Amino acid sequence: MKVLVADQFEAAGLEGLKAAGCDVIYEPELADAALAARIGSSEADVLVVRSTKVTEPMLDAGKLALIVRAGAGVNTIDVAGASKRGIYVSNCPGKNSIAVAELAFALILALDRRVPDNVADLRAGKWNKKAYSKARGLFGRTLGLLGFGNIGQEMARRAKAFGMHVVVWSPRFQRDGKAALDALPEDLEITVLNSPEEVAERSDVLSIHLALAPETRNFVDAALLRRLKPGAFLVNTARGEVVDAAALAEAVKTQGLRVALDVFAQEPAGGTGEFVDPIVTLPGVYGTHHIGASTDQAQDAIAGEAVRVIRTYKDTGRVPNVVNLATTTPATHMLVVRHRDRPGVLAHVFEHLRGGNLNVQETENVIFEGASAAVARINLDGNPPAALLRAIQQGNEDILSLHVVELGA
């Protein structure tokens, strides 16, 4: 199996792929048209990326079967395009959670103690202890979290160590209710609120941990920002597009918000480049270079998980952490075929289903002990008529029985 790694990747991960029997092509500087061309010329089966964008032309350039995002989010990959072409997209969730939480708390502390301004003045030969001695402190303050996945949970643990109260809103609690709450680790001490607005109103520090999706783009808008207390802190280590940048800049100017950003809507495609965003020039705004996941510990863990995903796919055909398989299909009926385990039986069944214009959505074939008989469960997008069932039954003596189950009935 050929694996094209088109981004920076840990040496241990490259060695792990080779040890798994993969033919590894490591070209971390590839991007855009050059990457599309290399996908074609390399005939790679698997593509591994971190921040490099994967576009539709790249999906048509070769014979990719799997794309692995060496990180959590997959917003840089054309997932819909991959799904149309039957290309798996997988990620490495949770492996960088501690690293991102550590940076988020570093930014919170930097905002409270104005660490970058202290450093800048000292380097400029200025001593201003009087001004910089004024800080609120974090003990007893309230940390609000929008989103409560792996990173949000690590934030809550660190907030507890600092003596902070934690209030949370997450789409998962809205969607799954009590089941989502019951699934949380017991060591978390949080208060779940009913709306993002309630979280904003109670927060001294608001930290964003929402995945980027159509429904979360510009989720933190002017109306939500107005709910924050004057002088509150806002930290975004999730995705730049989750926050309305213009509204945030206005809130900095009019509400005295202090802001720390590790992510921006328009970031350079590579590791270095020109960067212009007016918000980072505002007083009270600190920025870092999208480095939340960039610790040695996190990158080693992500590389190890990427290797596990690829090895599992190579050895079993299954893809851990796949993000683009349908949770529901158009299937309405299941055809259950009990049969002798002999060549041609399922081909006979599928040929008749094709003749009846019935599309197979999912299928499995389970073998009985001794490998003499099996049962096939075939999900269809319609109800096979009685005449078709008789033709299937009578056309092959190795079919022992069959019946139809209405799905969702």
Image: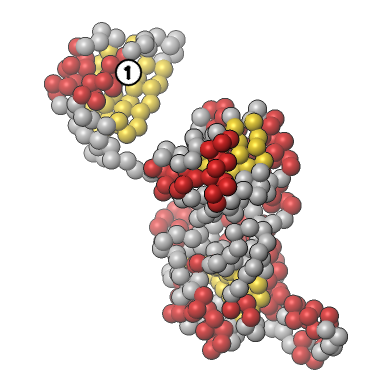
Nearest to the observer: residue 166 or residue 213 = 213
Give the vertical position of 361 relative to 173 (above or below).
above
Write the residue at 35% across / 32% down. Answer: 362
The residue identified by callout 1 is 346
Please tell me which residue is depicted at 19% across the width and 21% down the height of the picture: 389
Q: Quadrant of residue 27?
A: top right
Which quarter of the figure has residue 155? bottom right
Left or right? Give the position of 123 relative to 64.
Answer: right
Looking at the image, residue 78 lies above or below residue 368? below
Is residue 172 visible in the rendered image? The answer is yes
Colouring scheme, one of rainbow, by chain, secondary structure, one colour? secondary structure
Q: Position of residue 40 (x, y in %)?
A: 53, 38
Front residue of this view, candidates 123 and 301: 123
Answer above or below: position of 134 versus 77: below
Q: Residue at x 21, y 11 (%)?
A: 395
Which quadrant: the N terminus? top right
Left or right placement of residue 178 versus residue 24 in this view: left
Q: Position of residue 371 (x, y in %)?
A: 43, 11
| Label 1: element kind | helix
> Of the residues shown, which amino acid type is indicated by label 1?
Leu
The answer to whether one can see residue 184 in this image is no
The image shows residue 254 at horizontal and vertical percentages of 54, 89
Q: Is residue 383 above or below residue 267?
A: above
